[in-house]
Image: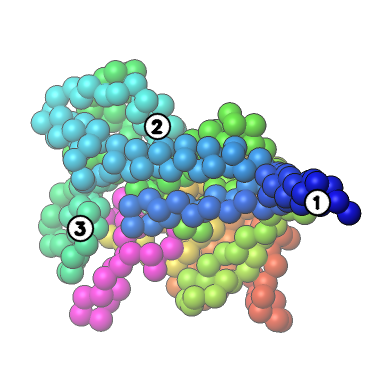
Amino acid sequence: MTAVAGIWRVLALAMLMLAGSASAAGLYEARIPVFGSWVDLSLWNVEPATAETAKRVVAGDMGELHTRWHAWEPGALTAINERIANGEPAPIEPHLAPILRRAQELSLASGDLFNPAIGRLVGLWGFHARNHRRPPPAEQIAVLVAAAPSMADLQIEDRLVTSANPAVQIDLGAFAKGYGVDIAIGRLRELGINHAVVNAGGDLRAIGRRGDRPWRIGIQDPFGDAHLASLEIEGDESVFTSGTYQRHFVYQGVRYHHIIDPRTGYPARGAVSVTVIGQSGAQADAAATALLVAGPAEWPGVARDLGIRHVLLVAEDGTLHASAAMAARLRFEQQPTPEMQITRLE
Ligand code: AMP
Ligand code: MG
């Protein structure tokens, strides 16, 4: 082989290798830090340049949403809450109107068990700060429950929100992650990406498939670090979990967690975690919160009202409750498969 032919062979090989690394085959994964937490992006068969664009776009969106929608750090939402508390109309940025309307619809459909208007109660319990330590006085809880803040009190126009009830304080904590994940999926689709998972700390929306098989995800065990079960999802499905273990404090031996039953003003009783599959992140996020409040006795009715078919609820006593559709899809790591109380929703 002449020296020139040898150089050509080396060059050809190098070009082949470059083509290989730039091809779209396989799984692309990226972890995006978002204010103390993260969003994991999984993309299937996407050109590297597109994948990098997707990562950049999603990172930008998520950071912006966090500051805009924060319930207590100064931003668009706190400005609205201040106006409402003073009984004044609140000017809003146009992008907020659809979010508030969607929250209003879901709140109504859940019979106000998902109630983002109870920001004052959440704040009273100290879950707007990191150093929540003891339950608030019963009289203060009673006053806020009697004031009955509801999303139905809000009149939402494109650039203005007015509240018929000054006790309303909007807290999108139970819903913003779902809405954000939906926005991220919309962005990916705009980039021509049709097979992806946007996973925000275990809460996720998946579209398409992972090549020749569905996406497989784990459901957190509320009593331990391991996965309780796994699920295969594909097409367009959102899996969200609300758990009492996620934020709580202990006072005089009693655990108080961050999901408040708007009917009592106290942390919801009966369930420790609820996982749902929904048609969008927003719907699934709101539903998981509502069903955790509903608890082991009432969840089926609320699930039907919200149009949710797949539910797994872990009760305080460790018993598992599931809709028939969910039970059929769960794969348990533990053998024999744990017993479940199964309810038909449809
Ligand atoms: P999630 O983990 O999605 O269930 O959301 C819980 C967060 O939503 C809490 O940390 C509060 O900020 C807020 N929240 C608590 N109780 C409710 C409720 N009943 N409806 C709506 N938001 C709530
Ligand atoms: Mg939620």
Q: Which residue is mark 2?
A: 99
Location of residue 91 by image quarter:
top left
Amino acid at dot 2 = Ile
Q: Which element carries disc 2, helix, strand or loop?
A: helix
**Mark 1 packing: few (<14 Cα in 10 Å), some, or many (20+)?**
few
| Residue 16 in view (yes/no) | no
Q: Which residue is mark 3?
A: 129
Q: Which element carries disc 3, helix, strand or loop?
A: loop
Which portion, as a residue range, is magenta? 238-265
105 is within the stretch colored magenta: no
Location of residue 155 by image quarter:
top left
Instruction: Give how far apart the Cα atoms at labels 3 and 1 are.
Output: 71 Å
Sequence-first tag of 2 and 3: 2
Find residue 5 and report its horizontal and vertical position in percent: 84, 47
Q: Which residue is mark 1?
A: 3
Instruction: Give how far apart the Cα atoms at labels 1 and 2 are.
Output: 66 Å
233 to the left or right of 96: right
Q: Which element carries disc 1, helix, strand or loop?
A: helix
Q: Nearer the viewer, mark 3 or mark 1?
A: 1
Q: Residue at x 55, y 50 (%)?
A: 41
Q: Nearer the viewer, residue 238 or 1?
A: 1
Q: Which mark is residue 126?
A: none
**Mark 2 packing: few (<14 Cα in 10 Å), some, or many (20+)?**
some
Sequence-first tag of 1 and 2: 1
